[in-house]
Amino acid sequence: MGKEIERKFLVKDMSFKTLAVRKIELAQGYISTDADSTVRVRIAGQKAFLTIKSRTVGFVRGEWEYEIPVTDARELLQTFTDGKFISKTRYVVPSDGLNWEVDVFHSSLEGLIVAEVELPSEVTVLTSIPAFIGKEISEDPRYYNSELVRTMTIPE
């Protein structure tokens, strides 16, 4: 089993764009958004993935991810999401030995920008936080992508 140890933050300015080393367009939807497990389909550029995640406890949850054909991902999104999916541009920003992933949301979520950083262990302390990082939202379920796709509105 893979583990995802992640913290999430709102982004307060666009300075991350000049620091980014990679940019990728993402489309993702959910086959299941059960509280104990989510099943996500994601198209990331020319690749696609099926991801299963367990319930989050603190900043940790189980994660299993498998590459699938893009044609299968498109069919899964069309068949299981009722046309409700998230589109966003992801910028990868290295800082202090970690990669921050900054997601700029599109469509009805336009204006929402969220940064997340995966940590190597549960006891890792963030000693340096980039200047573009704002309020932490790691434990606010309103900002989970599975919740955003359900409401398609930016939390207040």
Image: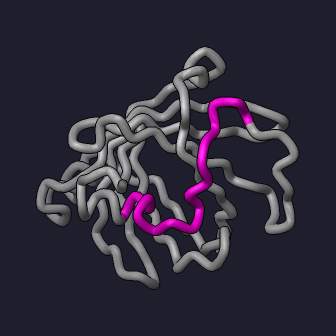
In the rendered image, residue 64 lying in the magenta stretch gets the answer no
Considering every residue shown, the one lying at the far top of the view is 18
Left or right: where 71 falls relative to 22 = left
- The image position of residue 72, as x and y in percent, is 26, 53
- The image position of residue 122, as x and y in percent, is 80, 68
Identified at 36% across, 64% down, the residue is 146
Q: Using the image, determine if residue 122 lies above or below residue 108.
A: below
Identified at 34% across, 65% down, the residue is 147
Residue 85 visible in the current orientation: yes
The image quarter in which residue 21 lies: top right
Left or right: where 38 falls relative to 117 = left
Considering every residue shown, the one lying at the far front of the view is 156
Which residue occupies the foreground of this view, 111 or 82?
Answer: 111
* Chain part drawn in magenta: 130-146
Which residue occupies the foreground of this view, 100 or 65?
Answer: 100
Q: Using the image, determine if residue 114 lies above or below residue 49.
A: above
- The image position of residue 71, as x and y in percent, is 25, 46
In the rendered image, residue 137 lying in the magenta stretch gets the answer yes
- The image position of residue 29, as x and y in percent, is 29, 57
Identified at 30% across, 64% down, the residue is 30
Residue 45 visible in the current orientation: no
Tell me how the rendering is colored: one colour
Left or right: where 50 falls relative to 132 = left
Q: Quadrant of the N terminus?
A: bottom right
Q: Quadrant of the C terminus?
A: bottom left
